[in-house]
Amino acid sequence: MTVDLRSLIREVPDFPRPGVGFKDISPLLADPAALQQAIGDLAERAREHEPDVVLGAEARGFILGAAIAAAVGCGFVPARRPGKLPPETVSATYALEYGQNSLELNAGAIAHGARVVIHDDVLATGGTVEAIGKLVEQLGGKVVGCSFLIELGFLNGRSKLGDWDVHALLEY
């Protein structure tokens, strides 16, 4: 039986600031069948890219990113907030739909030539994944795909991701 994943995404109006409709994935994560289906569907697409690692963006990208990597049979690399990884790190600052943020990778986390699928929970403006992808390339890796649980199509974040293969299970 297929689970209607969209029915398990809760819209939280005016969070984290007025005018933003936050997509809460907690109900989906709490449903065992929905969680398994989401991981399976995302892993199936990631597997096509034969990745060496799945890179997950802090914080919600960790939740499914590590599970996708395990299902595919590859490694997992976290992109963390500044100060959360031991030195030596590389970092990128990027714009969000409601501010700006920074993420860091351990400088040795991506081997030269590594095939990387970047995973985050939501594709909004594209700034997070664009910045992470540049770090991957700076370290000598190759972005072979980008996966998301949700894409907010009206924000056109896909346009920032160039030729990278982009896949989202749900679009709003």
Image (spheres, rainbow, N blue to C red):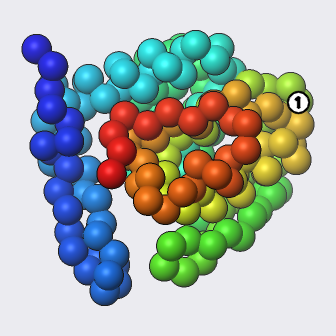
Residue 27 visible, this orientation: yes
The x and y percentages for residue 34 are: 19, 30
Q: Is residue 17 above or below residue 25?
A: below
Q: Is residue 68 left or right of residue 134?
A: left
Q: Is residue 44 left or right of residue 92?
A: left
Furthest-bottom residue in view? 18
The x and y percentages for residue 115 are: 74, 25
Q: Quadrant of residue 68?
A: top left
Instruction: Decide: few, some or many residues near mark 1? Use Cα within 10 Å; few <14, some 14-19, many ≥20.
Output: some
Q: Is residue 32 left or right of residue 52?
A: left
Q: Nearer the viewer, residue 170 or 107?
A: 170
SS for dot 1 = loop
State which quarter of the image contains the N terminus.
top left
The x and y percentages for residue 42 are: 42, 26
Residue 83 visible, this orientation: no
Residue at 37% over, 34% down: 169
Residue at 60% over, 25% down: 75
Q: Quadrant of residue 15?
A: bottom left
Residue at 58% over, 13% down: 48
Q: Is residue 168 left or right of residue 144?
A: left
Amino acid type, label 1: His
Q: Nearer the viewer, residue 138 or 22?
A: 22
Residue at 55% over, 15% down: 47
Q: Is residue 50 above or below residue 157?
A: above
Give the residue pinned by disc 1.
Answer: 112
